[in-house]
Image (cartoon, grey):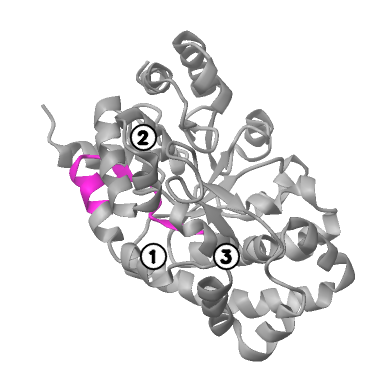
Amino acid sequence: MKTNAELLNERRERIRKAVALEKPDRTPVVPLMDAFCAKHMGAPMSKFANSLMYSNEVMVESMKELGDLDGSDSAFVAAPLFPLGFMTRIKMPGKELPEGMLWQLDEKEVMTREDYDTILSKGWPAFEDDYLRNRIGVPLDDVLAELANIPQMVKRMEDAGYVVYSPLVINLVTEKISGGRSMPGFMKDLYQCPDKVEAVIDVIQEGTLNELRQAIRATKSEYVFISPARGASEFFRPKLWERFVWKYLKQVADAILEEGAVINFHIDSNWERDLEYFKSFPKGKCVFETDGVTDIYKIKEALGDRMCIKGDVPAAMLALGTPDQVYNYCTKLIRDMGPGFILSSGCALPANAKVENVKAMIAAAHG
C-alpha cells in the first residue's frame, strides 16, 4: 500500500504530464471544491464559509471519503476573500443569510466615478485599505491573519496525499473596478471616460504585478489560478476587450510565466470569439479551464496542440443527473480531449451535487 507521500508525488507527476501535453498514466482529476465539501460532510455552512482553516479541515475529510482524486484547485473556501477581489460586499450564511445557504456577492455601485481621481492622486494602496475597511466593512485584519495560515492549510492537504493545485488566485484589476463600480457602472465608464479608467487600471496594475511576483517566489507555486470572469468576450466589443481585458490579462500571464509558474486560466462565460489570442503563449505552459459555456471542443480545436484543457462536467449533471450519465460524459471527454487534459467540474462542484455523481466522475478517470 502506498504512503500518502508516495501518492502525492504520483499525483503531482500525473498533473505535470497532463499540463506539459505528455501522456500520464491516467487522466488527472482536480475539481474546484468548496461548498460541496460542507454539504458532503454535514458541516455547518455558516462556519465553513466564514473560516478558511475550518473549511480546509472539512475539504480534506471530504477528499478522503471521495477516494482517488488527485487534488483540489485550492486548499480552502474563497468566500471571505471575495470582497478583496471584487471590492463589493458579501452576504454570508449565519450572518446576513440563513444557515445552510451559500454566500452571495451583494454587488452595488459603492465605488464612485469620483474615486478615480482619488486613486490617481493618492495611490491605490491607501484607497484600497480605506475602502475595504470603512466602505464595505471588511474585517481586514482578521482576513489577513487567516491568510497567514495558508502554508499550514496546504500542508494538511498534502500530508493527506492530495495536490493543492493552485494556492495562488489572481483576479484582474478590471474585476476589482467592475465589482466596486458595479458591472453597469463600469461599462458606462468605458464609454464615457475610457482614458481615466485606463489610467487608474495602469496605476493598480503596476503594484499588482509586483505583488504577484513576490507571492510566486514566496509560495513557490507551480500553478497560478487567474480568474478573469468579468472579462469574457461576450460582454465587450472587440476593441474594448483588447484595451481593457486582454492587455492586462496578457501582462499578468506574462509575469507568471517569467516567474517560472504555469498559468491556469479559469475561464467563466463565453470566450469563443477570442480563443486565437491564447495562441501567443508558449506550448505546455498554460491550462485553459472552462465552465462549459465556452465549448470545450472549440477550445480543443483552437488550442489543443498548445495548452492543457481542464473541465468541464456540468453543474446540472452533477446535481441532477445519474452516475451513469456522469460516467459516460466523463469517459467521452477523456477519450476526445486526449493526453493534455485534466478532468474537473465546470467551475465549482455545486453544493447540491450528488456524492455518487462526484464519485462517478472520479471513477471515469480510472477506466
- Tag 3 and tag 1, C-beta contact below 8 Å: no
Rendered view: 256 above or below 100: below
Was residue 155 drawn as part of the magenta stretch in this picture? yes
**Label 3 packing within 10 angstroms: few (<14), some (14-19), many (20+):** many
- Name the side, left or right, on which 65 lies relative to 201: left
Residue tagged 2: 37
Marker disc for residue 93: none
| Observer able to see residue 67 | no
Q: What residue type is labelled 3?
A: Val
Q: Which amino acid does label 1 sit on?
A: Val
User: Which one is earlier in the sequence, the residue at label 3 or at label 2?
Assistant: 2
| Observer able to see residue 366 | yes
Does dot 2 land on a helix, a strand or a loop? Answer: helix
Residue pictured at 67% horizontal, 77% vertical = 202
Q: Give the range drawn in magenta.
A: 154-170
Residue tagged 1: 143
Does dot 1 land on a helix, a strand or a loop? Answer: helix
